Amino acid sequence: MRHHTDGSEMGFTLTELLVTLAIGALLATAVFTFFLNSSQIITNQSTTSDMFQRGRNALALVRQAVESAGFGLPQVSNCPNGIAAYNVNQAQSPFSFTAITASVQSSGTYDPKNISGIDTYSLMTVAGGASFGNAPAAQISSIPSMTSQRVFLTGTALINPGDLFIVQIPGQACLMAQVTNLLTNGNGIGIVHNSGLSNYDPSGGFQTLASSVYPGLSAAAFVGANFIDLGSSNFTIDQFTIGDSGGTATPTLYLTQYNSQSPATAPGRQALARGVVDLQLEYGLGSNGAITQWVLPANYTASATQQILAVRIAMLARSTRYMPNETSPASFIMLPNQNLSYTVPTTNGPGCLQGNCSHYAYHLFESVVPVRNNIWGGP
C-alpha cells in the first residue's frame, strides 16, 4: 500500500491486488477441491453402504428359503425316487414338491454366460405349512382301475375337498393328485380326483401319472398304500431368478411366489435387490449327516443314499452408481471347489455406463446353509 508524504493512504498497488487475487483463487480452489473430494467420498460410501444393505437383505431371503425347504413335505425315506406329479397341461410339473431345485438360467431376460463366462442359477424352494404332517391320513382300500378317478379309503375324517395328496406305495411309487370331492354316494368311503376340476389331476387318472415315471404299476399295488394329505394351502413356493431387461438395465434379483393351486399361472416377479449380477449354488451331499462331496446342481442326480445336507450360496452384487475413481478386481472366485470365476465385463456390461462394469463397487456374499429337513432334492 502506498502512502503520501503527509501520511495519508492512497490504496493497494497492482502487484498487491494480483497477489491477493492469486491467494484467494488458490484458497477457493483448495476449498472447492476439498468439498468435491469430500462429496465424492460421501457418495461412494453411501453407494457402497447401499450395495451391502441390499446384498445382505437378499442373501437373508435366499437363506430363509433354503432353511425352510422341505418342511411339511414327505420325508425322503417315504419317496426316495421323488413324486410323479402333473400340471394342467398334462406335462411333468415343476411343482411336484421337490424341496430344492436349482437350474441354469438361459432365458432371454438374463444369460450371463455371454457376459461373464459362467452360468448362473435360478433357485426354487418348496415348503409346507404348520398343519402338514408326514403321517398318513388313511390307507387305500382299493381303486377300481388305473384309469379311475375314484379312490376308496379306510376313512376320510381328516380329508377335505381341495387337499393335495400323495399316494405312497412303499417300495414302489409316490403319486400326487388333488381331492375334488369326497365319495358320499353310498358305494364306499373315499375321494374323487377329477381331471376337470383340478390342475393336478390328469384325465387318465393314476395311469397317466405313473406311465412315465413308474411304468407297469397295477391297481392291485394300491391296496394298503398310504394316503398322505398335504392340505390345500400354506404352501410356500419361492423362485429366485436374475433379470436385466435384455441388458438395458442393472441386473436385479427377483422373487416369484407361486400359488400351488394354480401352477400354470405365475404371478408377477418382485424385485428384491438391484445389482445382483450372479448367483451360484453348490449342493453338499452325504449321508448320516456327514457331507462327503460338493457338486453343482447341474451335475446332481437325485439319490436315496446321497441327500442334500447343505447348500452353499455365492451371490455377487455390484453398486448401482458409476464410480469413476474406483476400479474393481478383474474377476471374482465364486465357488472355489468348482473353480468358477466371474469375469467383470468391460464391454457390453448390462446396465453399466458405456458397457464398462469395472468402475463399480462389488462384493461377494457367501453362506453355507444347512438343510434342516429330511428331504430329497431335484435335478
Image (cartoon, rainbow, N blue to C red):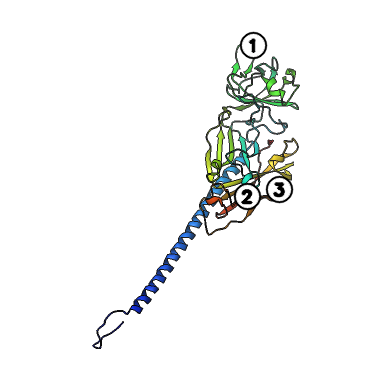
**The residue under label 3 is which amino acid type?**
Gln
Q: Earlier in the sequence, mark 3 or mark 2?
A: 3
Q: Residue furthest bottom?
A: 5
SS at badge 1: loop
SS at badge 3: helix
- The residue where tag 3 is placed is 338
Q: Percent x, y for residue 174? A: 70, 27
Quadrant the C terminus occupies: top right
Q: Percent x, y for residue 27? A: 41, 71
Q: Percent x, y for residue 116? A: 63, 48
- The residue where tag 1 is placed is 187
| 217 to 128, vertically: above or below | above
Mark 2, Cα crowd under 10 Å, few <14 / some 14-19 / many 20+, is: some
| 241 to 139, vertically: above or below | below
Quadrant the N terminus occupies: bottom left
- The residue where tag 2 is placed is 366
Q: Could you tell me which residue is drawn at 64 percent across and 29 percent down?
A: 93
**The residue under label 2 is which amino acid type?**
Glu
**The residue under label 1 is which amino acid type?**
Asn
